[in-house]
């Protein structure tokens, strides 16, 4: 391993931008095998490197996903394409509201195919099918993927919400923006997660007016107008309260839609009547209010999983409401 002056200067420059001074250990990031070609890192202190070794191209990147992804796309990916015989292209189709096994049953014949291949991958209430094809060019591979993707959507279109980098919140945001509709949020157990995920993407100000974290009963009464009698009779984690939260935030904010979440995220705090993982999500518009009960007890040991799955289901409930696919 040798120290590359270019990499050392990069460490100094990045620490200067951060308003800090590097320590001797930070300069280890300037050490690479002799003969390496350095890969620029515009946002982090650690550069990457590429090295030819016994006819193979070996590359190293920093482990931070955001840094690694952009560095790979700008440097290594073009080289891999140049050195590869043909092209391998993947397209990811995203689904929610259906389990991995149920989805796989409906496309089993496609899962058994070899080119294009179809692989199911699941996580946090969403399922994705990755369709991969090999051809001489990326365009030709894309044309091989098209009929397979069409066949999948013919069978599973009601659960589909986007492809590749699409997320539930970005799909919902597009729908609201296209409709010219506005949204307000009332969150309890998710603690602002819905608002965070919606505002992580630029352009959310076009549809999101406000989000309230009404964690206590007093906040639900004062900010959302949930009747005290309703809270006393049914408790904060209940269908009537979830509905009243969605209605209350929509009316107070003057928006087209109100979306609410209330539940027991755990890992403690549950009771026999209302165990950890019991969640209610509500959506309200001028046509009425709809509430869905979620049983997420299978993930009761993971507060994060309960919250993420609650947010996913809330986004999808509203998405279907906008598309006119829900029952009121």
Image (spheres, helix red, strand yellow):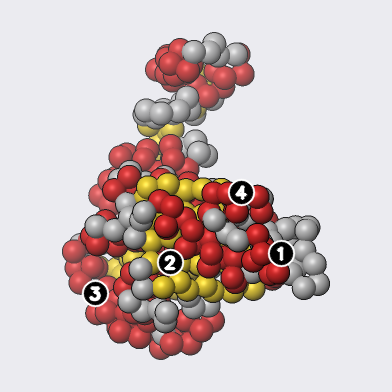
- Tell me whether the residue at label 2 lies in contact with that at label 3, contact meaning CB atoms closer than 8 angstroms: no
Disc 2 or 4, which lies upstream in sequence? Answer: 4
Q: Nearer the viewer, mark 2 or mark 1?
A: 1
Q: Quadrant of the C terminus?
A: bottom left
Q: Position of residue 65 (x, y in %)?
A: 47, 43
**First in sequence: mark 4 vs mark 3:** 3
Determine the CA span between mark 2 and mark 1.
22 Å
Whichever of callouts 2 and 1 sits on the residue coming sooner in the sequence is: 1
**Depth check: 7 or 123 in front?**
123
Q: Crowding at label 2, few (<14), some or many (≥20) Cα neighbours within 10 Å?
A: many
* Number of residues whose C-alpha sits closer than 10 Å to that of mark 1, classed few (under 14), some (14–19) or many (20 or more): few
As helix, strand or loop, the secondary structure at mark 3 comes to helix
- Find the distance from the CA under tag 1 to the CA under tag 3: 55 Å
* Residue to which mark 1 is pinned: 232
Q: Which residue is found at the position 66% from the left and 54% from the top?
A: 217
* Residue ID for mark 4: 219
Q: Give the crowd class for mark 4: few <14, some 14-19, many >=20 residues within 10 Å.
A: some
Q: Residue at x 77, y 63 (%)?
A: 270
Residue at numbered disc 3: 146
- Of the two numbered discs 1 and 3 on the same chain, state the one appearing first in sequence: 3
Instruction: From the image, tell me which residue sits under label 2.
Output: 284
Q: Nearer the viewer, mark 4 or mark 3?
A: 4
Q: Position of residue 269 (x, y in %)?
A: 78, 58
* Left or right: 213 as drawn, with respect to 81: right
Viewer-closest of 14 and 230: 230
Of marks 2 and 3, the one in the foreground: 2
């Amino acid at each position: 391993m040798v120290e590359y002056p270019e990499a050392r200067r990069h460490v100094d420059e990045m620490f200067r931008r951060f308003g800090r001074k590097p320590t001797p250990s930070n300069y280890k990031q300037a050490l690479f095998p002799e003969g390496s070609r350095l890969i620029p890192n515009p946002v982090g202190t650690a550069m990457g490197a590429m090295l030819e070794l016994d006819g193979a191209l070996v590359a190293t990147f920093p482990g931070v996903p955001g840094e690694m992804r952009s560095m790979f796309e700008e440097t290594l990916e073009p080289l891999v394409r140049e050195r590869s015989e043909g092209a391998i292209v993947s397209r990811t189709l995203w689904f929610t509201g259906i389990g991995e096994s149920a989805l796989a049953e409906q496309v089993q014949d496609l899962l058994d195919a070899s080119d294009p291949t179809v692989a199911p991958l699941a996580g946090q209430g969403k399922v994705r099918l990755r369709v991969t094809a090999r051809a001489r060019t990326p365009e030709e591979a894309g044309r091989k993927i098209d009929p397979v993707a069409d066949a999948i959507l013919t069978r599973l279109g009601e659960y589909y919400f986007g492809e590749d980098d699409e997320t539930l919140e970005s799909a919902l945001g597009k729908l609201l923006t296209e409709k010219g509709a506005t949204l307000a949020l009332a969150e309890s157990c998710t603690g602002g997660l819905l608002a965070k995920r919606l505002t992580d993407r630029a352009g959310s100000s076009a549809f999101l007016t406000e989000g309230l974290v009404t964690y206590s009963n007093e906040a639900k009464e004062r900010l959302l107008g949930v009747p005290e009698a309703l809270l006393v009779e049914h408790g904060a984690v209940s269908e009537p309260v979830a509905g009243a939260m969605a209605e209350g935030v929509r009316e107070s904010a003057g928006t087209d839609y109100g979306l609410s979440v209330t539940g027991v995220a755990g890992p403690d705090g549950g009771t026999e009547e209302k165990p950890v993982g019991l969640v209610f999500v509500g959506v309200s518009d001028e046509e009425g209010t709809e509430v869905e009960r979620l049983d997420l007890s299978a993930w009761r040991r993971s507060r994060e999983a309960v919250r993420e799955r609650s947010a996913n289901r809330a986004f999808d409930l509203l998405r279907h409401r906008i598309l006119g696919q829900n029952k009121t």
